Amino acid sequence: MPVNPASAPKSPERSAVRVLLRLWPYVRPVRGRWLGAAVVAVVASCLSLVIPLVLKWMVDGPVAERDPGGVWRGALYLLLLGVAEALLFGFRRWLVARPLSAVEAGMRADLYRRLQRLPIAFHDRWASGQLLSRGTTDLMLVRMFLAFPLTFLLVNGVTILAGYVLLIAQDWSLGLVLLTPVLPLVIVCSMFETRYGTVARRAQDQVGDLTTVVEESVLGIRIVKGFGRHRSQAESFRALSERLRGTELVKARLLAMIWAVITVVPELAIGAALVLGTVQVADGDLSAGTLVAFLSTALALRWPVESIGFLLAMSQEAATATERYFEVMDAEEEPDTASPTASTEDGPGGVRFEGVTFRYPDAPDDAPPVLDGVDLHIRPGETLALVGGTGSGKTTLTALVPRLHEATGGRILLDGEDIALMERARLRTLVSMAFEEPTLFSASVGENVLMGAGETAAEPELERALGVAQADGFVGRLPEGSATQVGEQGLSLSGGQRQRLALARAVVGRPRFLILDDPLSALDVHTEARVEAALREVLRETTALVVAHRPSTVMLADRVALLSRGRIAAVGTHQELLRSSQEYAWLMSGENQEKR
């Protein structure tokens, strides 16, 4: 599993408020409807504080005076207040549903665009499940926070403040009794926020790990079944599930503790106020209606107070989700061009490597570079075969040409132009690649192949490319021809068929520069011969670099370069290197081919 640099829980010292404020650019376009919804919710919540005043009027008026008409009128007032409150809360939900869904969709689209622009080194380090969970679970938590906790932290705060003003206005001594729990509750909530934030981060990272295991098991189901590893995979999944379950139980215990404290402490204060108020009524210092209104107001404030723990928990989870989201958004994109101070002088045509060095960003300081001062020139219209032992850096060298990785030293020229100074989009219209491991998408055969062509590509280009790759035969036998859906990863096709489609994708756009990384390794001898014959015609029209492991592939090239220990050890024709290089002769020998 790839290393996930974000898997460790972050320090709880970070401010949840500061993290959540980073959502403002996404919320700004819908701030009008969100604020409108908040105002509606405040009005609806404050209506509940009017009910105790109606009760006071009823007890001290119609009830005390034995006026049935007044009692029915008061009941009607209470019914109207309840209906109005319900309608206002329904209106609030309608106001925020659509805009906040748009916020979530916009954030998800931005995340997807950023993932497309991040360098290959980033994707090599991050587990795919962690990225998937950031685009799904985390963004759902953010939307829920914007729709509910954010609104009701404001609404409940205003309601509690207004309620306490009413309580003190009705009887200041009883109001002070209910204010006594405020300080301990603030301290407890602060401690809860710190601990819950740490546990929430751990849980969401574990969800990402679990997602990664599920994804790997589904994509590698043939390996799991072929080697009978379903039990070990199930054990791995069960272990991660148990870890996540344990973390969720810790979250539940913390939430239960804060809920208990926030519920019990105010209840004790209400009980004390009830006893004191009853004594005052008995002494004649307080009217019965005032005591009923006071207690009704206090009870109306129970939910706003008790929900603080729940709202803080959701806010902490949203802050963690936001932090995880921006870990990806803050990752440095691959630069479009290098520093303008880089050399721009023209050199010879074709492809030229001048002192190219490459070291992976996360490699140990004492590790030798993968490529160390590579000097190589592929002439215009020439096909050069790149040969080397396993781990010699062949694939890495080919990946530098379209800037899938950035060279850490030296430069690469295409027709005399430094690729580091070229816009990445333009560079990739000039260079086309076929990778050693062919990857197909859940689309039709034609759509997969035409990914390698411009937007104006048409059916003749598709047919030509399929013919070059000798794929037209099996494609024609598919149920819907080139319109047939190949399924996820193209696993409904054989390895050789996938490789031929990948080759067709590389040649369909008639690129000026063609990079082929062992493009025929999965083909049988007869198909390979037919593909090579058709491919020779294509190679005459382009400048090509072909990674080769077999003599048959080498024979496609005009010259051969031997890559050894990160350097070009020899360049020449196949026959010349067989005579002059023992390493090359061994690589091309039958003994080595059998080992391969």
Image (cartoon, rainbow, N blue to C red):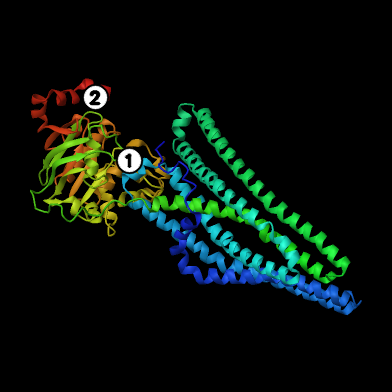
Q: Is residue 349 above or below residue 371?
A: below
The residue sitting at the top extreme is 591
Horizontal and vertical percent position of residue 275: 82, 59
Q: Quadrant of the C terminus?
A: top left
Q: Is residue 432 left or right of residue 72?
A: left
Asked which secondary structure carries label 1, the reply is: loop
Q: What residue is shown with label 1?
A: 438
**One can see residue 467 in this view:** no
Please, what is the three-letter code of the amino acid marked with disc 2? Answer: Gln
Residue type, numbered disc 1: Pro
At which x and y percent is residue 354? 12, 42
Horizontal and vertical percent position of residue 278 = 84, 63
Name the residue nearer the viewer: 35 or 531. 35
Furthest residue to the right? 66
Badge 2 crowding class, 10 Å Cα cut-off, few under 14, some 14 to 19, many 20 or more, is: few
Residue beneath the point at 56% across and 57% down: 144
Residue occupying the point 9% across, 49% down: 349
Give left or right: position of 341 versus 88: left
Q: Nearer the viewer, residue 272 or 537?
A: 272
> According to the image, label 2 marks what residue?
593
Residue 208 in the figure: left or right of residue 177: left
* Left or right of residue 166: residue 126: left
